[in-house]
């Protein structure tokens, strides 16, 4: 952060974190199929967490906070737990939690990590984009 070296994970640690993301994605897909929710719902909602990019309009710090809020497993864990309270709702909460988990896992598998306030390209998995290519 602030220098030309990646502040994120590297080497075997980065590989393991990306593999963990792939496993999260795979498990979420499997569990989504088990609940029998329509795949149209999955396709319609899969990219919704990326709407958090809009927060970058307000600067890197707010952007990182918005992005990170939607790209950790905290939200889908809470949603999955709430779904088990069997509250009267017409919204299928558990399938939405699985979609959200799948999105987070997919992003991690691709190497997109949580963002630092220093900028969108500075992530916990290392730099992404042009800046990363220049420092490699």
Image (cartoon, rainbow, N blue to C red):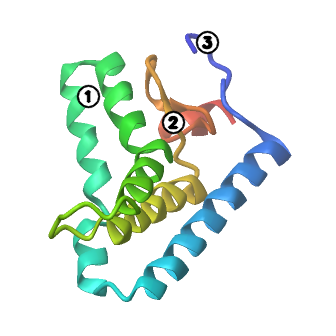
Q: Position of residue 63 (x, y in %)?
A: 31, 27
In the image, is residue 78 above or below residue 136?
Answer: below
Res 72 seen here: no
Q: Nearer the viewer, mark 1 or mark 3?
A: 1
The secondary structure type at the circle numbered 2 is loop
Sort mark 1 into few (<14), some (14-19) or many (20+) by Cα contacts within 10 Å.
some
Total marks shown come to: 3
Q: CA distance from mark 1 to mark 2?
A: 14 Å
Residue for point 76% across, 38% down: 10
Q: Which residue is mark 2?
A: 114
Residue farthest along the left direction in this orientation: 90
Residue for point 56% across, 53% down: 108
Q: Which residue is mark 3?
A: 3
Sort mark 2 into few (<14), some (14-19) or many (20+) by Cα contacts within 10 Å.
many
Residue for point 19% across, 64% down: 88
Disc number for residue 56: 1
Q: Earlier in the sequence, mark 1 or mark 2?
A: 1
């Amino acid at each position: 952060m602030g220098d030309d070296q990646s502040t994120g994970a590297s080497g075997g640690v980065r590989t393991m974190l990306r593999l963990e993301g792939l496993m999260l994605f795979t498990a979420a897909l499997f569990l989504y199929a088990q609940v029998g929710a329509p795949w149209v719902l999955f396709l319609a909602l899969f990219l919704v967490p990326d709407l958090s990019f809009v927060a970058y309009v307000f600067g890197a710090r707010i952007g990182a906070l918005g992005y990170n809020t939607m790209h950790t497993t905290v939200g889908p864990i809470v949603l999955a737990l709430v779904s088990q309270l069997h509250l009267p709702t017409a919204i299928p909460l558990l399938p939405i939690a699985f979609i959200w988990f799948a999105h987070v896992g997919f992003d991690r598998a691709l190497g997109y990590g949580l963002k630092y306030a220093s900028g969108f390209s500075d992530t916990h998995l290392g730099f992404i984009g042009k800046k990363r290519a220049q420092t490699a």
